[in-house]
Image (tube, rainbow, N blue to C red):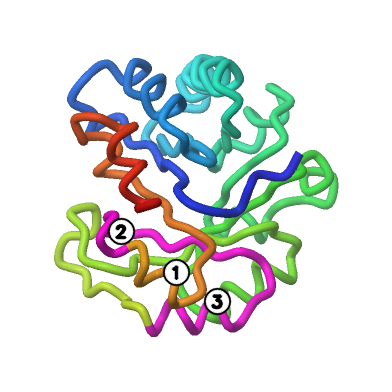
Amino acid sequence: MIICMSKVICVTNRNLCLEDFLERIEKIASAGVEAIVLREKDLSEKEYEILAGQVLDICKKHQVQCILHSYVRVAKKMETNAIHLPMHRLRELSVEDFQSFEVIGASCHSVEEAIEAEQLGCNYIVAGHIFETDCKKGLEPRGKRFLRNICDSVEIPVFGIGGISPDKYETIQTAGAAGACVMSSLMTCENPKDYIKQFGE
């Protein structure tokens, strides 16, 4: 199964969560997101595996694609079909590991990286950061032109990330993006279902 390449993908950060993390995941999974990327890079591999099992169960219940992040061995052990990787980890992926997944995504920060990710066999890429965001305080956003250049350079779907709120969603669509990856606001908004709806209005 390949994830639907449109709309909103949630990228997690439990440290931003204002309530129990799994309760928040339950709300997000039932809110209409296309996928949830479990990006908890500060955890040990064992801690990540435990959390991944819980999140995978929630996603399965709501029929939402769960994409594990960085921990390839955990993803293979749990027989998940999707993994998201930073470029340096993608370059290290063996042929056997590539064949273990139906969905492979990568985080790209330049046209060159986007082209390389596609050539290596990725199904989609995430490009950013597009707008100002608290997650990248003090770093200049790359903007719409950067996103358009990425989208024009590859055939696979591109998702923008970084400060993308509902009022900025049309901007990234006109740049050619297939959708948005959203982190901070989905971890902190009052009602994830209402928030996700705004991206379609």
Distance (Cα) linking label 2 and label 1: 11 Å
Instruction: Give the residue at mark 1.
Output: 173
Residue type at mark 3: give it. Answer: Cys
Residue 103 vs residue 6: left or right? right
Residue 106 occupies which quadrant of the picture? bottom right
Give x and y (percent) for residue 20: 27, 16
Q: Magenta span covers which residues? A: 145-168
Residue 165 vs residue 98: left or right? left
The secondary structure type at the circle numbered 1 is: helix
Distance (Cα) linking label 2 and label 3: 16 Å
Give x and y (percent) for residue 48: 48, 25
- Tally the marks: 3
Residue 129 vs residue 191: left or right? right
Q: Name which residue lies at 63% across and 42% down.
A: 83
Q: Which one is in front in this view, the residue at disc 2 or the one at disc 1?
A: 1
Give x and y (percent) for residue 81: 72, 35
Q: Name which residue lies at 69% across and 59% down.
A: 122
| Pick the front one: 181 or 73 | 181
Instruction: Give the residue at mark 3.
Output: 151
Residue type at mark 2: give it. Answer: Ile
Residue 187 vs residue 55: left or right? left
Image quarter hosting the N terminus: top right
Q: Name which residue lies at 35% across and 62% down.
A: 169
Q: Name which residue lies at 32% across and 77% down.
A: 143
Is 167 within the magenta?
Answer: yes
| Pick the front one: 59 or 119 | 59
Of mark 2 and mark 3, the one earlier in the sequence is 3
Of mark 2 and mark 1, the one earlier in the sequence is 2
Give x and y (percent) for residue 193: 34, 32
Q: Which one is in front in this view, the residue at disc 3 or the one at disc 1?
A: 1
Q: In this view, does 153 lie above or below 118?
A: below
Instruction: Give the residue at mark 2.
Output: 164
